[in-house]
Amino acid sequence: MARPLLQMLLLGLLAPLTTAAESEGSSEGLVAEAIDQKLIFASNFSSPITPQTPPLQGWWASKICAGPSQKDQFCIYTNRRVAKGRGMVVITHQDEFEKLEKMEDHLSKADNKFYDDPVPFVETPVLQKGLGVVANKTLRRNRPLMSFSPVLLVHRDFFDQVPNKKERAKMLDTAVSYLPPETLAKVNKWRQPTPEYTSPRSLETLLFAHPFEVVLPYVWRTPDAPHSRHAAAYPEVGVFQHDCRPNLAWYIDEHFELKLTVARKTVPGEELTIAYIDPLKPTEERSQWVAHYRGKAQNEGLPAEKHTHHDGCPCKACSPPGGPGGEAAREQEKRLKEILAIRSELRNYDSTKVNVEMIEKFVKLVEQDRLHAKFAEAYELAALNFNYLGEDKKAKKYADLAVQAGIVEGGINSNDVVAMRIMASDIKGHYSYKYTLKRRGLAK
């Protein structure tokens, strides 16, 4: 009797799978059970996921998966000891997980710390933004503030290929529940920062409002495969509000660690901000993004009467005195368009329009627009183009400035910093010296 009963049970499990494969959108199931080394999917996101306890050591596959097919499934993987016990959970494909599995020692080199104790800032409500961060002492440019590894990585395709939002939310909530208690507490504080939030904000909303990203390289066996992009969550950074002309700069290093550094001198009482979107995008595009993603993240979980007004970007770069149509706004938009136009010429080493006056105007406009978190590229372009024209002293000046700015924006070992150090060490020996003059037949 045991054998027929087992056959009936297996048929009962396989029947929903056959039906799901034949119906549109039914392959979104979360639960996957190992039966004869095959994964059986059930579209039952409304049912509770069986609690599991990951091991304290090494990577662990939860067998909780979702996706358009067994081949393209996204599963939850976790490692509670990685990054010196900070832990990490990942929602990704099996082959991407295998890359991470080989990177554990590399990921564990992250610092995971604030550089000052006590930290030189406090959390406080900020007008039109909600909870933010304000300096409580003078902070000078190039001062490091914090360095943390991600606690959650989510393959970017997950949001498109798992179309059911409830299913995505349940999978994300389940994933972070596997983090070590101390790390989970930080995630929960990020989701529900003050008692005013009657419910926690969704992880998906927060990931889109804080669009940090890490890229896993292709597998060496398949060099034609694309790099894979993963959304990354850094809860300690989440409290910093957005500004299109921020006073902090950030970058993600080779260990996936996000480093936050002061980009412009700040004084006590000044809000500390970072840019979550490219500051050089058109004002209207920036305002729409901030209103949609940042506004949603700010208001989700709050009672309606507590919602922060968001019909655009509240920072001064998007909402200067006089309003969007005022003189200050027009001047700023004119300046931004000029910056982008000149940058395009400076990036084109064959341009015949570039001259000393254009380069100097470009630097002046960037500095005037308070783009302190974007100085590195501006100074690098100035250094190269001055050298193209044989202006070696000016080239040397801006190569040195590019190194200093590059350390703030990308780290001391970033490719741009290394390149500018090499150039600054031998301006006239650099390939760029008199490059344009030689192409114009004005120098040998």
Image: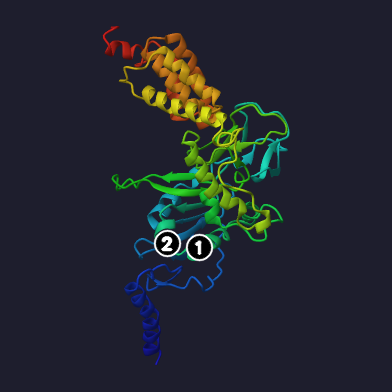
Task: Tell us which disc is closer to us: 1 or 2.
Answer: 2
**Element type where label 1 sits in the image:** helix
Image location (x, y in percent) of residue 254 = 47, 38
Residue furthest toward the bottom? 1
Kindly identify the amino acid type of the residue bearing the numbered disc 2. Answer: Val
Whether tag 1 and tag 2 are in contact, CB under 8 A, the answer is yes
Q: Is residue 283 above or below residue 205?
A: above
Amino acid at circle 1: Met
User: Is any atom of residue 265 visible in this view?
Assistant: yes
Question: At 66% across and 29% down in the image, what residue appears?
Answer: 266
Q: Quadrant of the N terminus?
A: bottom left
Residue 417 visible in this rendered orientation of the protein: no
**Is the residue 67 above or below the residue 256 in the image?**
below
Q: Residues within 10 Å of mark 1 (few under 14, many from 20)?
A: many
Q: Position of residue 386 (x, y in %)?
A: 41, 14
Q: Residue 249: where, in percent of width, then height?
A: 56, 33
Which of the 4 quarters of the picture holds residue 11?
Answer: bottom left
Q: Which residue is mark 1?
A: 171
Q: Which mark is residue 162?
A: 2
Q: Which mark is residue 304?
A: none
How many tags in the picture? 2
Disc nearer the start of the sequence (1/2): 2
In the image, 379 versus 130, the foreground residue is 130
Q: Position of residue 96 (x, y in %)?
A: 40, 52
Q: Residues within 10 Å of mark 2 (few under 14, many from 20)?
A: many
What distance separates the C-alpha of mark 1 from that of mark 2? Answer: 10 Å
